[in-house]
Amino acid sequence: MSDDALTQVVRMLAEVVGEDFLLDVEIGRDTTFNDDLGLESIEFVALADRLRDHYGDGVDLAAFIAGMDIDEIMDLTVGDLVDHIAATEAAHA
Amino acid sequence: MKGRRMQVPSLLGAPGIPRAETPKRRFLFAVPPLAGHVNPTVAVGTELVRRGHTVAWTGHRPTLEPLLRAGARIFSAEDDAFAARLAEAREEWLRLRGPAALRFLWEEFIVPLGHAMMPGVRTALDRFRPDVVVSDQIVLAAPVAARLREIPWATSATTSAEFTRPLAGMPLVEEWVRDQIGDFQLDHGIEDLLDLRFSDHLVLIFSTGALVGDTSVFPDHFAFVGPALDRPAGAAFPWEWLDGRPAVLVSLGTLNGPAGERFYRVAADAVRDLDVQAVFVAPPGIVDGTPPNVLVRPHVPQLRLLQKMSAVVCHGGHNTVCESLAQGLPLVVAPIRDDQPVIARQVEAAGAGVQVRFSRVRAAELRDALTTVLTGDAHRAAAEAVRDSFAAAGGAAEAADRLEKLA
């Protein structure tokens, strides 16, 4: 299930950021949103929209971030988001 | 130094003096070494001097001198070694985004600046003996020094981002910021902690509800006075270059390294085939093969130039945004860091402009955004509504009224 979520998140990021900006980056579980991708606020909102469209209101990126401290937000990885999606889906299964 | 003059007001009023005389007071502005934070204080200071008060600034003298009017009194509160360290840190800061930039701003800039300014600010209080200290929102030293001396102090908020609580969605981060402010006060012997970003006497915000949103939730000592725009004109400009077509100002404040260079190249491509002229505020030679409808100038007389513009593309710096809106100009905003995403959202929510990406913006994206704000009346009308609210708010004169009441 989490492999599937990883595929989805990578696809969404490619859409939001643009494939041609990711030529040098292999997005995986360890990719950080802040340092590796430099995701801008507009792109973050666009990703949140895509996640909600695909997974429903259960996957709320803003709410996911809300409980984190500044280090956790700085170090947030694609894998953290994938695990959150998996946990949310398991809870609704 | 003149002694303080007290006056008994005349019952009948003095002939030829229409406004009630207020006693002459002394105001000290404490500012960080950032032009955008200094400029509004120049306008307020000029208005106070016009009313017969005495003003001075405390901060980094080499940064302040070119920004202030000739002869302005400056009390140095940042030595050159520290200023050099800050300049170095700034280079690193320009590479950061989001939470990393926030952390860096507090740990490497605001808190060390506060400690470094403390002795100089104290000396300024001893020697200038101000009746009121006006502290920039990110100068922690001035409120602490003023409180220790029991001098009334006001906050000068040169960006309105903090008034929309941008970190409300991240309570632990918001708490972390307050901890930085609390620890600073404890370090200097104050245990009755305040949020030093918001004076409990007077907070001057150089914006209005038309941009910030609902301001009725704030207490009366929060004064939304609108932009304070009177400052020295600055650089020369070849006015004859403007040929009457719609013109666009493109400015990122500072260059922001390679990402900024890329942004200007993309902007050149975006306007190349549009029937507009564009003035880029950037180092010469930044765009190879600059299109004929683009003029690159390292410095511009921005306030005067805006009067000739039809729209503005910028990074969302509060001053450039408000100066543009004060002329009723719609905006395309490409926020980079700090308060800029918040200000960009304010502009969009007010209907006065659109947001685009910064690092990965494409020429088509920028061209569409620019065409959107230039054609059709909606964005221009919204920008003009903000302009009218700014004009009604009173700017530097209203700020001076509020400061006189505090003195």
Image (cartoon, grey):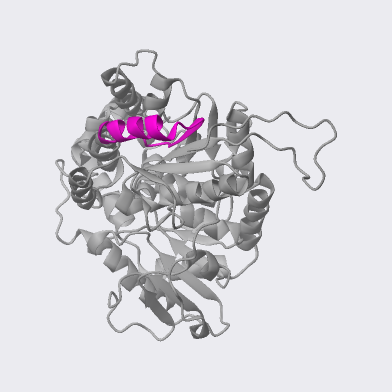
Residue A18 is left or right of residue B67, and the answer is left
Q: Residue furthest right?
A: B12
Q: Nearer the viewer, residue B151 or B129?
A: B129
Q: In this rendered view, identify the residue nearer to me: B297 or B100.
A: B297
Provide residue B198's location: percent of width, then percent of height: 47, 29
**Residue displayed at 23% across by 43% down:** B79
Kindly give the residue lying farthest to the top in the view shown: B191
Q: Which residues are drawn in magenta?
A: B114-139
Image vertical order of residue B44 relative to residue B24, above or below: below
| Image location of residue B39, percent across then percent down | 46, 52
Q: Residue at x 63, y 50 (%)?
A: B390
Viewer-proximal residue among B406 and B168: B406
Task: Answer with the quarter of the image where residue B298 lies.
Answer: bottom left
User: Picture coordinates of residue B205 (x, y %)?
Assistant: 54, 40
Seen in the picture, residue A86 relative to B370 is either above or below; the reply is above
Height in image: B406 above or below B244?
Answer: above
